[in-house]
Structure formats: C-alpha cells, structure tokens
Amino acid sequence: MSFMTYLTKFPVHVALARKPEKTQRWRVDDPEFRHRAVMGLFPDFEDNQARSRNNILFRYEFIPGQAPYFLVQSDCDVVAPDLEGVIETKQVEYPSYENGTPIIFRLALNTVTRRTIETNGRKREVITPVALQPLDAETGLNPAEKHVAYKLSTALQGIEFLNHNRQVLQVPKVSRALQIDTFDCMGVVTNSQALEHIMHAGIGRAKAYGCGLLTARRAA
C-alpha cells in the first residue's frame, strides 16, 4: 500500500536565524538545535510522543550547489506562518514498491551498536560507534555498510553502496557523540510492507536528532 506524507525543505540558515531571542547561539552541529528547529515547524503538541505519533522524521541534506537544508517528512502539515515563502512544503504519495523492484534510496542512520554488560552485579549499556574499516574480504563491505545491510535485510537485498558521508555531532551534557552516516544506495525490494514501514516510521534510533529517514525512487 502507498501512504501520504508531507515533505518540507527547511534551509539550515533560516533555522539558525529563526530564534534571535535565544541568548546562546544555535550551532548546526548541535543535535538539540536540529531537533528543536524541526519540531518548531509544528504546532505545540500535548504529549511527549508527538514526533513518533506523527511520524516526523528529518535528514540534514548537503547537495552540491545548494544551501544545506533539513528534509522533513511528516504525517501532519507544518504550521509556520513566519516562514511562508521561505520553506517549501508539499503533500506527496509514496508508492508501494512490489517485491523484486530495484530502487535507489538515501538513508541517514545512527551507526552504533549497543550491548548490555554486567559488572559487579550491575548492568549497563555500552554504545560503540561502527567503524569504516576494515573491509570484509568476502563481501567487500566495510563495517558501517554491513551494519546498514543488516538493518535493512527485512526489506531489501543486494544493496550496492554508491556514496557515503559521516557526521559526528556532540550531544550536549553527554560524553558521547552522535554518529550519523548518510548513504546513497541501490537495492532490490524483497518485502514491500517492511519497506513501507521503514519509509513511513523510520529505522534505528536517534530519530529525534535526524536519523532514520529513508527516501526512495524506482531505479531507471
């Protein structure tokens, strides 16, 4: 089945300048800024699950020849009268890709692994960033690419990696960083329903900070 969604192009420089009353200047590499800027496009929600309930996802886009922008996908329309004529919003229908369909897609993913260890009777979660080396001799993939292929294995197979960019953002008041890998890939749909769920609801963690959005088109 297809699904309807809103897509919004929100220039980063506009987002940075939108709250001039803020005493501390926003920084584009601050995950909290990215979250607040995007959620600030929508009305004040009454619950803490507003992002997930409305399937609000976004991705930092850096296309040569264009100013950087946030691509925002949401079930609900934005409400930002002060940005009329500055941001671009349109409602689109994403098609359902049948099994066996080759697609080209872009995905931003929080590439970390998590495991629970126990020390002196106390459990704690260990978060490890996924590296880019070494290459797997059998598959020719690096660890980050293997991580992506595994995460998408319920929906796609035969993934080919075309382009990659990594951003490491420092999480305020936390000693760890947020690692965001953006991949351009080709793949073959093996489960259309699973792919639709990923495209609509996102995949992985840190969706509130710009991870998890997968956009796709049919390969020529």
Image (cartoon, helix red, strand yellow):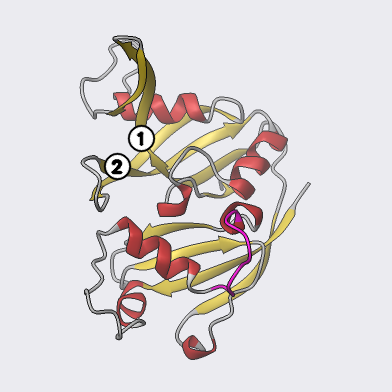
Q: CA distance from mark 1 to mark 2?
A: 6 Å
Q: Between 48 and 43, which is closer to the camera in this rendering?
A: 48
The magenta stretch spans which residues?
A: 42-49
Q: Estimate the x, y position of residue 122 in percent, counting from the top left.
A: 35, 16
| CB within 8 Å, label 1 to label 2 | yes
Badge 2 amino acid: Gln
Q: Between 198 and 36, which is closer to the camera in this rendering?
A: 36
Q: Estimate the x, y position of residue 124 in percent, counting from the top left.
A: 35, 22
Q: Secondary structure at mark 2?
A: strand
Q: Which residue is mark 1?
A: 111
At horizontal 43% and vertical 56% (from top left) the residue drawn is 59
At horizontal 32% and vertical 56% (from top left) the residue drawn is 31
Query: What secondary structure is the stretch in magenta mostly built from?
Result: loop
In the rendered view, tell whether residue 206 sits above or below residue 42. above
Q: Between 118 and 105, which is closer to the camera in this rendering?
A: 118
Which quarter of the figure has residue 44? bottom right
Q: Secondary structure at mark 1?
A: loop
Q: Estimate the x, y position of residue 154 in percent, counting from the top left.
A: 60, 26
The residue most toward the right is 1
Residue 144 drawn in magenta: no
Query: Badge 2: how crowded within 10 Å, few (<14), some, or many (20+)?
Result: some
